């Protein structure tokens, strides 16, 4: 038990010394070149974070993500065709596609797919 306590305290002391030495010798620069450059998206990191953002673009993006995830849920239907009853396969596939089409029709009727006003 004594050896375990000794090893734990020695590990803690060594790690504290390494952190202290690294913080003392590190060069602290407030104006970093990487932090001052724009991100990949083109937003200026030093500017205002409350830039106006198109709500239409956000809605189209969310709709795309929803339908993209639903397409990945449809992919297993092709793989289980030979493993299940054809009637069950058709009913489950058509019901899922019907839900997708009803959702698409609802988004279309609400005008969420219209880009211009």
Image (spheres, rainbow, N blue to C red):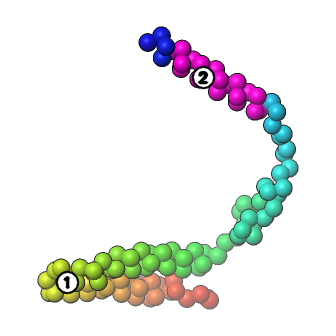
**Sequence-wise, which precedes: disc 1 or disc 2?**
2
Using residue 115 as the reference point, say whether residue 77 is left or right of it. Answer: left
* Residue occupied by mark 2: 12
- Which residue is at a point 64% across and 76% down the rendered structure image? 54
- Which residue is at a point 46% across and 88% down the rendered structure image? 108
Badge 1 vs badge 2, beta-carbon distance below 8 Å: no
Place residue 10 in its image quadrant.
Answer: top right
* Residue occupied by mark 1: 82
Q: Position of residue 88 (x, y in %)?
A: 16, 82
Q: Position of residue 60 (x, y in %)?
A: 54, 80
Nearest the eye: 59 or 75? 75
Using residue 93 as the reference point, say whether residue 50 is left or right of it. Answer: right
- Which residue is at a point 82% across and 33% down the rendered structure image? 25
For the residues labelled 1 and 2, the Cα–Cα distance comes to 61 Å
Nearest the eye: 55 or 8? 8
Q: Position of residue 26 (x, y in %)?
A: 81, 37
Q: Position of residue 110 (x, y in %)?
A: 47, 84
Magenta residue span: 5-23
Kindly identify which numbered label has been placed on residue 55: none
Residue 6 lies in the magenta-colored region: yes
- Which residue is at a point 77% across and 60% down the rendered structure image? 45
- The C terminus sits in image quarter: bottom right
Using residue 80 as the reference point, say whether residue 6 is left or right of it. Answer: right
Q: Secondary structure at mark 1?
A: loop
Magenta segment's dominant SS is helix
| Residue 14 visible within the image | yes
């Amino acid at each position: 038990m004594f050896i375990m306590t000794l090893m734990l305290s020695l590990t803690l002391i060594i790690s504290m010394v390494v952190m202290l030495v690294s913080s003392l010798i590190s060069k602290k620069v407030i104006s970093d070149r990487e932090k001052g450059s724009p991100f990949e998206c083109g937003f200026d990191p030093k500017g205002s974070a409350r830039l106006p953002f198109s709500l239409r673009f956000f809605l189209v993006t969310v709709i795309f993500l929803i339908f993209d995830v639903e397409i990945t849920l449809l992919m297993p239907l092709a793989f289980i065709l030979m493993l299940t009853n054809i009637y069950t396969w058709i009913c489950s596939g058509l019901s899922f596609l019907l839900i997708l089409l009803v959702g698409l029709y609802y988004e279309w009727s609400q005008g969420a797919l219209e880009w211009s006003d």
